[in-house]
């Protein structure tokens, strides 16, 4: 397990994730097909030539999934109970086939759970950049994170 516990994820904590990912045409086409998204902007090269972008744009839902996925090893692998939701998701610039995405995760807020004794709620801010350092995604994600397990007390039955 490489994820962090609630106690490690204090406001201001930040990590630049080592994993970077170049987005391919296959990623975009397959994700659009798997999710039944027939938007011509994603899958029709001839149509996309006539748009303001002049080429196909990578499906933004794929980008969001990639951004969160890249963060897992460094933040939540094995220590999250689950995602609670997204407060905000923005895509300031489009992503195109061949763009390489890097991600930074910051802890925007954290608090103990009011209904559970084993966890707390962490608000992550995921920020993605392309190879030109353009911001291409910002997402605020709330996750229910495990508290660090307490060590067994001395004399406790094994």
Image: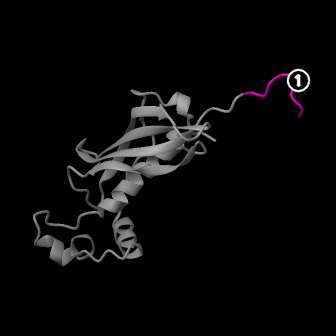
Q: Quadrant of the C terminus?
A: top right
Residue 99's place in the image compared with 42, above or below, is above
Give the residue at x 34% y 67%.
28
Give the residue at x 61% y 36%.
117
Q: Which residues are magenta?
A: 151-158
Q: Which residue is mark 1?
A: 155
Q: Position of residue 141 (x, y in %)?
A: 39, 46
Q: Position of residue 30 (x, y in %)?
A: 40, 72
**Is residue 96 among the parts visible in the rendering?**
yes
* Residue 154 drawn in magenta: yes
Q: Quadrant of the N terminus?
A: top right
Give the residue at x 20% y 49%.
92
Give the residue at x 20% y 51%.
93
Residue 38 sits in which quadrant? Answer: bottom left
Q: Helix or strand or loop: what does disc 1 sit on?
A: loop
Q: Looking at the image, which is closer to me, 104 or 5?
A: 5
Residue 129's place in the image compared with 32, above or below, is above
């Amino acid at each position: 397990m490489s994820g962090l516990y609630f106690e490690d994820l204090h406001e201001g904590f930040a990590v630049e994730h080592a994993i970077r990912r170049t987005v391919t045409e296959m990623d975009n086409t397959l994700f659009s097909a798997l999710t039944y998204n027939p938007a011509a902007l994603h899958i029709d090269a001839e149509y996309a030539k006539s748009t303001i972008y002049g080429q196909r744009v990578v499906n933004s839902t794929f980008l969001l999934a990639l951004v969160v996925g890249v963060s897992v090893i460094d933040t939540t692998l094995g220590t999250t109970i689950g995602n609670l939701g997204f407060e905000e998701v923005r895509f300031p610039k489009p992503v195109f086939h061949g763009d390489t995405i890097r991600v930074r995760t910051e802890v925007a807020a954290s608090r103990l759970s009011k209904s559970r004794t084993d966890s707390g709620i962490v608000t992550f801010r995921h920020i993605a950049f392309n190879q030109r350092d353009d911001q291409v995604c910002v997402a605020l994600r709330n996750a229910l994170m495990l508290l660090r397990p307490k060590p067994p007390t001395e004399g406790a039955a094994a």
